[in-house]
Image (tube, grey):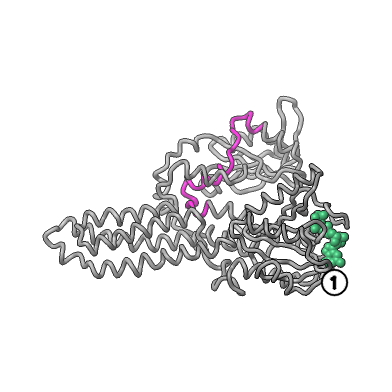
């Protein structure tokens, strides 16, 4: 595995004050709800002291001192009540070889929320404070163990919904994006050195600064890789963030049946009664590595029933958020006025989303030919399926995939094997590219080296934002807010 050099990262985070790391923080690190085990994590200078206070080891002779990275078996005690809270395994990990680079203790107890809460409150009563969301990872960043792209990869990894998403996150966690950015930065630094010499020796400036050559280098070594990274961010966005597809159609055409078939489970209620679905139901499916949120909605029709009316309003609202509309028709019935007016209102209300017609119930005797639907409803692509008999489903997935990616195969590269910048990185890359172009214009205009140095420094600064060289507190807050407590 390739990890960025520690010294680089230490320099990188030196611009942050680490006064906050004086405090010892604690949180439940496992998800809520019953489980086999639950983990409480403590990080900071008091970690081991708090653990020793609460822990009653079960050894013939109690350990005099706790070795780092070793499990200890015993009980967590509530000394005030004089009673044990749970049987646990505790591990003490001494700084700096820990997740946060601080002293860390993890207590593994039984996975009961009550036990976890009880132990956490004892830990807090003994000097720790409750950790904010992502605070452990934020400390790992502030203490130079991770750069900002790696910290972001942690949350991507936790939230990954497909294999492609997971490997993208792992690559970033290994520091691959950091390496690509650092390679560009290195070349910029070399150019800066040349410009600086020219600033120091103005009489030799023309000999030192070869404008044409510098411009060529900027194009090849800086602009080209920046453009490539930006293109990858755009193309890879669907793998990173996924898309949302909403199933719309009049009542009873089989929308919920399709959701269930795609999910391969009976998630939504299906009945022959029109108006079965009242609320919207959302679930993720994986289409060739692309996470797709499928939204099943209430069949839209004129109704006097308030509950159904609310469901219909929600269905319409979902249209606004979706990238793709799966407009469903019933092949066993002729097109109705409801189909047509609903289709028109979809077109009217859509923000130019892609629309895919789905002709369902093809296992029944057809009422009209597929071509007639397309001609009546405009030239939208159409896929025939039977949600009930599970036929046409892989063609449906292929069509969704190619409609979104714009090609049959998807990207020309493997998102799982390449680093894909996120929106924040892309923004910084674009600003870096703009500054680089200004630098080129400056070279063309024969600007003095000290003016050239300004745009070069700006390019470097924007690239530095990606890895977190001088990121402001609000940017950090925005990033770590996405985390769960305990990570
Ligand atoms: N023969 C056949 N019946 C289907 C198919 N898909 C759905 N159905 C039936 O059509 C009826 C309605 O299906 P649902 O999936 O509840 O339809 P819906 O569009 O969600 O209906 P609402 O929620 O009321 O808007 C049920 O009796 C399903 O079994 C299909 O492909 N073939
Ligand atoms: Mg339904």
Residue 202, image x and y in percent? 14, 58
Q: Mark 1 Cα within 10 Å, few/some/many (few <14, many 20+)?
A: some
Q: Residue at x 83, y 72 (%)?
A: 366
The quadrant where residue 351 appears: bottom right
Q: Is residue 34 rendered to the left or right of residue 454?
A: right
Which SS class for mark 1?
loop
Cβ(mark 1) to ligand 1 < 8 Å?
A: yes
Q: Is residue 146 magenta?
A: yes
Q: How many marks?
A: 1
Residue 215 vs 138, above or below: the answer is below
Query: Looking at the image, which is closer to me, 9 or 284?
Result: 284
Instruction: Mark yes or no: residue 425 visible.
Output: yes
Kindly identify which residue carries mark 1: 363
**Which residue is outermost to the right?**
272
The quadrant where residue 25 appears: top right
Residue 225, image x and y in percent? 41, 66
Q: Is residue 48 magenta?
A: no
**Which residue is outermost to the front?**
337
Find the magenta span and give its range. Answer: 122-151
Residue 432, image x and y in percent? 38, 57
Instruction: Mark yes or no: residue 266 visible.
Output: no
**Which residue is outermost to the top?**
80
Q: Residue at x 51, y 57 (%)?
A: 422
Q: Is residue 67 rendered to the left or right of residue 424?
A: right
Q: Is residue 381 rendered to the left or right of residue 82?
A: left
The quadrant where residue 433 appears: bottom left
């Amino acid at each position: 595995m390739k990890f960025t050099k520690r010294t680089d990262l230490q320099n990188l985070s030196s611009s942050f004050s680490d006064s906050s790391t004086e405090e010892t923080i604690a949180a439940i690190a496992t998800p809520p709800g019953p489980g086999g085990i639950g983990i409480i994590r403590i990080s900071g200078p008091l970690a081991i002291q708090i653990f020793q206070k609460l822990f009653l080891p079960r050894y013939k002779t109690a350990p005099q001192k706790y070795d780092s990275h070793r499990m200890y078996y015993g009980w967590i005690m509530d000394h005030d009540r004089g009673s044990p809270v749970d049987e646990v395994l505790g591990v003490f990990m001494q700084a700096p070889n820990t997740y946060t680079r601080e002293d860390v203790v993890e207590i593994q107890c039984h996975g009961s929320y009550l036990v976890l809460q009880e132990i956490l409150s004892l830990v807090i009563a003994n000097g720790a404070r409750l950790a904010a969301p992502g605070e452990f990872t934020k400390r790992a960043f502030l203490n130079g163990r991770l750069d900002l792209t790696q910290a972001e990869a942690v949350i991507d990894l936790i939230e990954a919904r497909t294999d492609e998403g997971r490997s993208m996150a792992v690559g970033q966690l290994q520091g691959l994006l950091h390496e690509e950015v650092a390679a560009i930065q290195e070349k910029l630094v070399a150019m800066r050195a040349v410009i600086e010499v020219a600033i120091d020796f103005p009489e030799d400036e023309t000999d030192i600064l070869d404008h044409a050559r510098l411009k060529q280098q900027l194009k090849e070594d800086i602009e080209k890789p920046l453009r490539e990274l930006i293109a990858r961010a755009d193309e890879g966005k669907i793998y990173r963030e996924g898309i949302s597809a909403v199933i719309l159609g009049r009542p009873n055409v089989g929308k919920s049946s399709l959701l269930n078939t795609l999910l391969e489970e009976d998630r939504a209620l299906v009945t022959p009664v029109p108006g079965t679905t009242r609320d919207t139901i959302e679930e993720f499916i994986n289409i060739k590595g692309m996470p797709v949120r499928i939204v099943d909605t209430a069949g839209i029709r004129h109704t006097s029933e308030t509950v159904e009316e609310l469901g219909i309003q929600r269905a319409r609202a979902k249209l606004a958020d979706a990238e793709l509309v799966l407009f469903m028709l019933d092949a066993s019935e002729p097109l109705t006025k409801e189909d047509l007016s609903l289709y028109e209102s979809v077109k009217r209300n859509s923000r130019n989303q892609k629309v895919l017609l789905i002709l369902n119930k093809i296992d029944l005797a057809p009422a009209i030919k597929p071509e007639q639907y397309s001609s009546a409803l405009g030239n939208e692509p159409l896929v025939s399926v039977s949600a009930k008999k599970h036929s046409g489903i892989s063609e449906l997935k292929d069509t969704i995939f190619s409609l979104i990616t714009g090609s049959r195969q998807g990207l020309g590269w493997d998102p799982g094997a390449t680093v894909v910048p996120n929106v924040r990185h892309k923004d910084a890359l674009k600003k870096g590219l703009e500054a680089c172009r200004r630098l080129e214009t400056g070279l063309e205009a024969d600007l003095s080296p000290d003016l050239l140095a300004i745009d070069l420094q700006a390019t470097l600064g924007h690239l530095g934002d990606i890895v977190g060289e001088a990121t402001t507190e609000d940017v950090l807050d925005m990033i770590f807010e996405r985390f769960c407590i305990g990570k």
